[in-house]
Amino acid sequence: MLLTQSLNGIDYLEVAETEQTVLLLTMLRDPAALKLGAAQVEILGGESVTGIKTLEVAALPGAANALRIEVNRAGDFSTYTLLLRADDTTDEPPLGVDPVLARIDFSFKAGCPATNDCAPVSCCPPAAVDRPDINYLAKDYPGFVQVMLDRIAVLAPDWQERHAADLGVTLVELLAYVADHLSYRQDAVATEAYLGTARSRISLRRHARLVDYRVDEGENARCWVQFQIDGAEGVLLPAGTLVLPRIAGLSARLAPNAAATQQILQQGGVVFATLKDPTLSANFKMDLSATLGASLNQISFHTWSDEACCLPAGATAATLKGHLTSLNAGDVLLFEEQLGPLTGAPDDADRTHRWAVRLTRVHHTDRFGNVLTDPVENKSVTDIEWQAADALPFSMCISSVTDEDHGSVLIKDVSVARGNMVAADHGKWPQPGPNEWEPLGTVPAPPAAPVATNAADCCTPAGSVAAPLPMFFPALAASPLTFARDFDAAAPASVLGAAAPPDAAAPKPQIEVVDDRGTKWSPEPDLLSFDKLHHGFVVEIERDGTAYLRFGDDQHGAAPPANGSFRARYRVGNGTAGNLGSDTIAHVVTADSRITSVRNPLPASGGRDPDTMETIRQLAPSRFRTQARAVTEEDYGAAASRYPGVRAARGTLRWTGSWRTAFVALDATPRALSPAMLAATIATQLDLIRMAGVDLATEPAAIVGLRIALTVCVKPHYATGEVEQALRGVFTAGPTCNGTPGLLDPANFSFGQTVYLSPFIAAAQAVDGVAAVRATAFQRVDDPANDATGIGYISMQRLEIPRLDNDLSRPDRGFLELTVDAG
């Protein structure tokens, strides 16, 4: 790397062999002018040993450009970072120090003996393969035919015959016929009075509500769309702007009032609209806008003079080229691989290497207010950070060198960042105009009142028969009605179309209803908790997708006034039809000529179809059997396991002296909240279902580390180091090179699990080049006196979870010892 004459920086760092509390730091130039003190040298990182403090910084006698740094204690086996900073209030480097060369990673244990090359082995696991999408809830003849044809299309894509006389189609129809008769025998239809025999989906919805099951009406899909702007900044994009899937022969920008545009919108195809932020306004009609600019069409990453640079998996920060003042915290950026790293061709770019992040920090200037620049290249840059929930799930290549077949040349901008990202969801509101509101009809006059009598019998007292209400049950002309969740403008960008957590609110129908008196009626899940003063209605979907509106009866919700008329304005578009693939959206309905194109670089997701009638029949009867209170130990564990961030939980009832306490041990997932926050969250949720008189406490699971020692004999003509490296690739707690979890992954261990030795020996024996494997130790770390090699298994108590992380910084969580001998 080139270095200007006025800048200094770190060359390398050594750890003193005799005592690991002395660090020898060599600079590129004489560090005397920097006047570094203990407050300007910070040691970061560590697993079991953290908070290392710098005691003294002095020149190293007899060594040019070197400093002797003394710290208070030695670190563990993990990687630490030595950081030079201007003072103890900032992380920026001292004046005169290159920002890239102001920090260095090192290990206090660098002098420990090693049998292999210490360079890390990087591998790129393949993308996970999705499980086959099979509808296991098909219960009628067309459904069975479709499931079988869908499955055959996956297994034998070349078979495309659909003629009824074909032998394959005949067999499919025969099997579907038999399956339909079996389903009919199970679900014989009799009457609408029973959940298992009703033919109307609305009847099933009302039956299901009696057993506390809320029918799922589906949800619309969402996606991120990216706009390209032609040479302008500050372009306002109104919320609700329509974007459409690609239609051959049409330009990217469609004029709103053009006849072709109106014809497309009236055909009822898939239409997306840019989202509003409901936290800014609850009014449907307020025109909120997104601000777009040409400077955000494509942004290059700044690599700080590095070549063949990659943004590693798990990254939450990067540096962009340019002084990007139009970029702010809260904005969404897309990281996209646009060139093949080995060929440089756009067609060879990996379409799965695309990721959206929501920025939490944008750094344009330094602490003095000057434009942030790279002092080596003298170019302006912008530092960005994003949420941990949006951390990169894969490594992104920024620049690379092509292979020999393509000239072995350096290519830049293999991956770039793109702004002008706007959220959009499936569904279309009617176009403004005289037909924007759909008339629902007039409420009929009530039936004649029953004949009043002066006498009363034993069953019906005189005058107690109320007059019947008018029958008003209007249907919407268009379908499917859109059901959507509120848009959270602060949520991580990577969860835009993700499934909602169990305790999230259900999607809301996108509809407005007004009567002829100007009264607004609001959609509600049901009217059971409302009185006759509440103007609400319930949307009920029939089996053909038609939406009906059910109003109150003056006991639960207000009844519609006799002879009154209603009108509705609603949105159409729902379900899995909106789950479009990437780069499917290609048209935007706008009159702004500065907007040149639009695309969805990521697939639309989150679209769910409504519950089918068969789904309701299967799920509703078991809903009232769901345990909504915790009584036994198993109840507490099962309830805690249902919440995100908890891999497994186990409850225990103990007498604490004056009362019983339910202790819940938690095994958290790797990306869960902090242990304290997770414990507090689970305790709050469990407090709602605990028994009266029982106290509640959450605690972490008891982790039991295991020690396994294996002696491996290598076959002749195999390199011992390579075989050992392959063995450690199998015995890992992270993902292996083929994308599958390692043998020591924490997810492979749970409460009270008996650990057997044989799977470890079998895994080692399966490695290529291994001739024989012999176990020499198999024991708990906390009980080294007992060895279970002879019996071949170790039993755990019910609240103990075995672990074998094989992390030298945390030996209490288990470690593996490999002794590899040449054959």
Image (cartoon, rainbow, N blue to C red):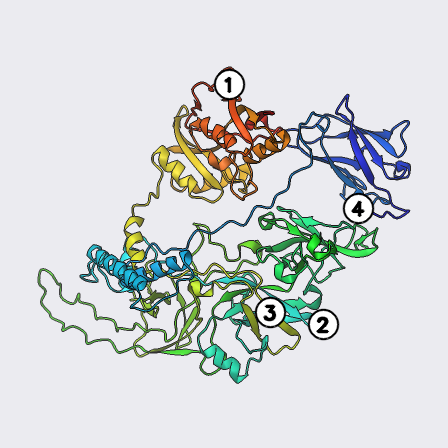
Element class at badge 2: loop
Q: Which mark is residue 67?
A: none
Vertical side of 820 occupied by 446: above or below: below
The residue depicted at 77 percent of the width and 40 percent of the height is: 103
Query: Is the residue marked by circle 3 packed among few (<14), some (14-19), or many (20+) residues within 10 Å?
Result: many
Question: Is residue 822 visible to the viewer in this orientation of the structure?
Answer: yes
What kind of residue is marked 1? Answer: Asp
Q: Earlier in the sequence, mark 1 or mark 2?
A: 2
Residue 545 position, x and y percent, is 35, 68
Q: Which residue is mark 4?
A: 99
Q: Residue furthest top?
A: 785
Q: Which residue is mark 1?
A: 783
Give the CA distance from mark 1 to mark 3.
Answer: 63 Å
* Disc 2: which residue: 231
**CA gap, disc 1 to disc 2?**
70 Å
Vertical side of 202 occupied by 820: above or below: above
Distance of mark 3 from mark 4, alpha carbons?
Answer: 37 Å
Q: Position of residue 405 (x, y in %)?
A: 69, 55
Amino acid type at image mark 2: Gly
Is there a contact, CB below 8 Å, between mark 1 and mark 2? Answer: no
**Quarter of the figure with residue 106:** top right
User: Horizontal placement of 230 versus 670: left or right?
Assistant: right
Query: On the rendered structure, is 731 left or right of 567?
Result: right
- Decide: marks 4, 2 in contact (CB < 8 A)? no
Return the disc, 3 or 4, that comes first in the chain's sequence: 4
* Vertical arrangement, residue 551 with respect to residue 663, above or below: below
Disc number placed over residue 598 in the picture, else none: 3
Left or right position of 430 against 556 = right
Q: State how far apart marks 2 and 3 are (Cα).
A: 15 Å
- Residue 777: x and y, percent? 52, 20
